[in-house]
Amino acid sequence: MKKICAITMVRNDEFYLRKWVEYYGAQLGRENLRVFFDGEDQVVPDFCEGVETLLRPREAGNVAQSDKGRIEFLSSRAALLFEQGYDLVIGTDVDEFLIVDPLLNQTLSAYLSERKIKFCLSALGIDVGQHLNLEKPIDSSRPLLSQRSYAYLSSRYTKASVIAQPVRWGSGFHRVKRYDYHIAKDLYLFHLGGFDYEMMKKQLGNSDLLNAGWAKHLHRRAKTTRIVTEKRSRNWDTAIPRMRFVQQWLRQIFAWNKPWNPITKVVVRIPDRFKNIL
């Protein structure tokens, strides 16, 4: 088995961090997780026991500036992990989860250990939303995906999350600079940042986020709720292979190493086999 580490950076977000630690800890082992806290004013939660953590000075500036600083820091930390003997490093935001299709009956560690990865590997982006007519606010005591059945297939979340050698990630892990991408079959990046409307409304009232220029980003997340509520959902097993093909071969006009999806917004119903994973 390959030695794999997962890293993330977080600020004031215990809800997603708890789930991130639980999920990746179960998949890779807590000793193989690194959590960096953006700001020395943060407090490391008790549920991070067994995880290597670091409080660092807060990244100053607007969203674009701070994102650039954070990803440069995380890229440098990933490079150190390779020096320490890791074969692969997973980089995600704290609300993103790399999930292997349950049909394979494999852990994330086992799945990635079988893949030949030269530079990086991407999972197909699954942007989970709340269908306002059918789904209630999230209950954190229950599995999250058991309460959400719809997702938008967004190329924005088809990220270069897995790297096999020291490289430079682009902001938000959206790409690896100077290298092409490959979208793996049966691997998905579930993004939960826009999966609960009440949580998003609270974020839109968070002065810390708004002062840092997050308003546009948060409104984009809220769009996912509107899309999954209004659009007719398609069958997962039919839509997914088509979307993977489209995103593999169509690139962003000004960024050839980022996938692009020009197709009308595609919403899918998440199969029941994923319900108890998160």
Image: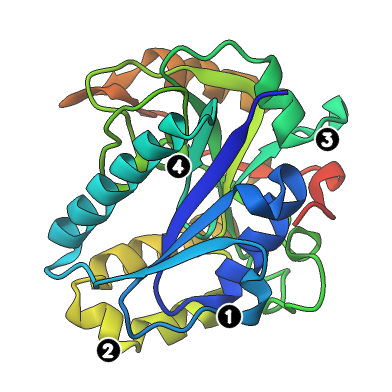
Label 4, residues with CA under 10 Å away: few <14, some 14-19, many ≥20: many
Residue 241: image location, x then y, percent: 63, 20
Per the image, the residue denoted by label 1 is 45
Q: Is residue 160 visible?
A: no
User: How far apart are labels 4 and 2 at the CA level?
Assistant: 26 Å
Q: Earlier in the sequence, mark 4 or mark 3?
A: 3
Q: Are marks 1 and 2 in contact (CB under 8 Å)?
A: no
Per the image, the residue denoted by label 4 is 157
Per the image, the residue denoted by label 2 is 207
Snapshot quadrant of residue 116: top right
Q: Nearer the viewer, mark 1 or mark 2?
A: 1
User: How far apart are labels 3 and 1 at the CA level?
Assistant: 30 Å
Type of colouring: rainbow
**Would residue 74 be found to the left or right of residue 59 on screen?**
right
- The three-letter code of the residue at mark 2 reads Ser
Q: Earlier in the sequence, mark 1 or mark 4?
A: 1
